Each structure stands twice: as C-alpha cells, then as structure tokens.
Image (tube, rainbow, N blue to C red):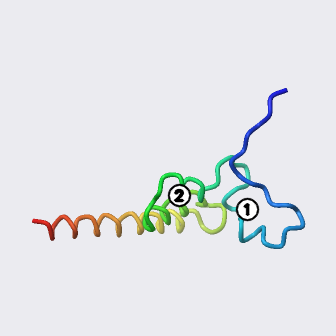
Amino acid sequence: MTENLYLIKLPAKDDQDAEIESPKHYIEGRTIEPISIVEDWNLNHHLACALKYISRAGRKHDEVKDLRKAVWYLERRIKLIEKKQHLKE
C-alpha cells in the first residue's frame, strides 16, 4: 500500500490554535506549508513575506491586493540590495 506523505501537519479538529498554527488559507489543498519553505530556504523577512502573499493570493483576501503586497516586499528588498551595493562603490 502506498502512503501519501505530507509536509503539512494537519491540526486536530478540536485544536483551538489551529487557525494560528496552520491557517486554512495557507494549507488547504496543499502538501507543503509556506512556512516550511521559508524555513528550509532560510528566506529573509522580505522574501518570506513575498512568498506568504503569493501563496495565499486569492485565498484570504483579494488576489490582486495580495500580489501587490508581494511585489511591494520584493521591490523593497531590491532597493535594500541596491543601496548596499551603492555604499560599497
């Protein structure tokens, strides 16, 4: 018998902290929770937030709004990198 392996730890139905630990808008229908990717890839704050908004786009709030938030974090990260590069010159 083949067993499906899931990286998401599904909360018990009576778990009062389920919405905090594993919000549905991040895990429903998925096998990998975004926080696991953030931790595995050791993403900094800006990239982690961008991933978070991309992963939940259209699942919690307006899809375009979530994607714009992701772009905002990416652009902010780019500006920080460019600023650091400029200071080194």
Name the outermost residue toward the top. Answer: 1
Residues at marks 2 and 1, CA–CA distance in whole angstroms: 17 Å
Residue 3's spot in the image, x, y percent?
80, 34
Picture residue at 78% right of the left edge, 67% below the top:
18
Residue 89's spot in the image, x, y percent?
9, 65
Picture residue at 85% right of the left edge, 68% below the top:
15
* Mark 1 surroundings: few (<14), some (14-19) or many (≥20) residues within 10 A: some
- Sequence-wise, which precedes: disc 2 or disc 1? 1
Q: Where is mark 1, residue-wise?
A: 24
Q: Where is mark 2, residue-wise?
A: 38
Q: Quadrant of the N terminus?
A: top right
Residue 84 lies in quadrant: bottom left
Q: Using residue 85 as the reference point, say whether residue 26 is left or right of it.
A: right
Q: Nearest the camera: 85 or 56?
A: 85
Picture residue at 19% right of the left edge, 64% below the top:
85
Q: Using residue 10 as the reference point, say whether residue 58 is left or right of it.
A: left
Q: How many labels does the image show?
A: 2
Tell whether label 1 touches label 2 (CB within 8 Å).
no
> Does 9 appear above or below 67?
above
